[in-house]
Image (cartoon, helix red, strand yellow):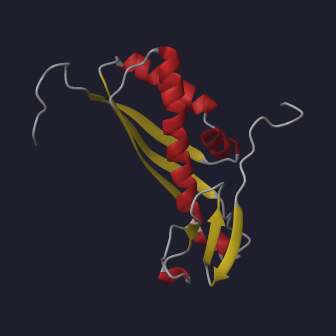
Amino acid sequence: MPDTPVAVSRARGEWVSDALSRVRVRHFDPLIVDEPAAEGGGDTGPRPTEYLMVAYAGCTAVIAERVAREMAFSYDALQTDLRGALDPRGIEGQPEHDPHIHTVTGWVRVTTREPDERLQRLAGEVERRCPLYQMLVRSGTRVEVNWRRVEAEPTGSPPTTD
């Protein structure tokens, strides 16, 4: 590990009311963090755990693009669907229940003409290099995300309609 980090991410948060807070990152508009009404919030924004899934999905896409470029791996689209599950009793303070996200399940769909073997090589390298994946796995979260290939239309053929 380097003595000085190369990249630092910073978020500045401010509690507003109940479960609502605003968080600023760099020069962007504030992110709204809230809980559903049934859980004491106003349902005006995603939960913190949903932002974690957003971060993991985004990290997957960013790292996949970098790795694909290095591998000369061609793809037309990449989609993710991720779900994090936790036991809310831990958040409620019940000491016998751990509040961390226990499992992340879902899929990554890649539209490509590349063979499955190259897709799995891409997936393995993305998992190795994605900081969010590594953080989840090293915290003890079981991550079960399946990478799937969707056949791309051959070049020059008309699009199909469903």
In the image: residue 93, left or right of residue 109: right
The relative height of residue 106 versus residue 89 in the rendered view (above or below) is above
Residue at the front extreme?
27
Give the image location of residue 131, x and y in percent.
Answer: 65, 39
Give the image location of residue 83, x and y in percent.
Answer: 47, 54
How many numbered marks have been drawn onto this rendered protein structure?
Answer: 0
Residue at x 62%, y 71% (from the top left corner): 22
Figure quadrant of residue 162: top left
Residue at x 51%, y 53% (from the top left corner): 54
Residue placed most toward the observer, 32 or 131? 32
In the image: residue 113, left or right of residue 53: left
> Considering the image in quadrants, where does the N terminus appear?
top right
Residue at x 48%, y 83% (from the top left corner): 38
In the image: residue 16, left or right of residue 53: right
Residue placed most toward the observer, 140 or 41? 41
In the image: residue 17, left or right of residue 51: right
Give the image location of residue 106, x and y in percent.
Answer: 43, 46
Give the image location of residue 2, x and y in percent.
Answer: 85, 30
Residue placed most toward the observer, 94 or 151? 151
The relative height of residue 38 versus residue 79 in the rendered view (above or below) is below
Figure quadrant of residue 151: top left
